[in-house]
Image (spheres, helix red, strand yellow):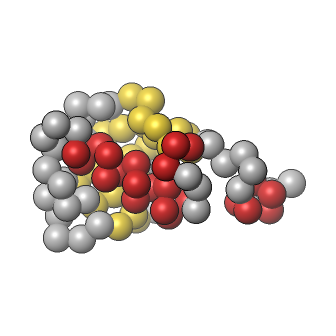
Amino acid sequence: MRINVRVVPGSSRSDVEPGDPWCVHVHARPAEGKANEEVLQIISRHFGVARSAVRILNGHASRSKIVEIGLEGTAMAEGTR
């Protein structure tokens, strides 16, 4: 599954707001990839998948990103069958 994400770095909270694009608030600032890593951790927690199942496809240096979430073998994927 791929989602469009808009990142809000330096936020006072870490959370995900569904929509198009999904809004992801992170504590980290966009330095040395720290905000990107926090985005991946928050999204993996939100969807209940391993961190390794989430990756940024496009927008590594931008607030707008395309994120891919691998749902194979998860409860979410099994519920869609």
Question: Is residue 60 in view from this perspective?
Answer: yes
Q: Is residue 29 left or right of residue 72?
A: left
Q: Specify the farthest residue to the bottom.
A: 13
In the displayed structure, 37 sits above or below 58; it is: below
Quadrant location of the C terminus?
bottom right
Residue 12: horizontal and vertical position, in percent?
17, 70
**Percent from the top left, x then y, of residue 63?**
25, 41
Give the side of residue 60 with respect to residue 19, left or right: left
In this orientation, does residue 6 appear?
no
Residue at the image point whose x is 46% and y is 37% from the top: 55
- Say if 80 sits above or below 64 in the image: below
**How many numbered marks, from 0 up?**
0
Q: Quadrant of residue 22?
A: bottom left
Residue at point 32%, 31% (across, down): 59
68 on left or right of 30 = right
Residue at the spot 31% in from the left edge and 52% down from the top edge: 38
In terms of image quadrants, where is residue 36? top left
Q: Is residue 35 left or right of residue 59?
A: left
Q: Quadrant of the N terminus?
A: top right
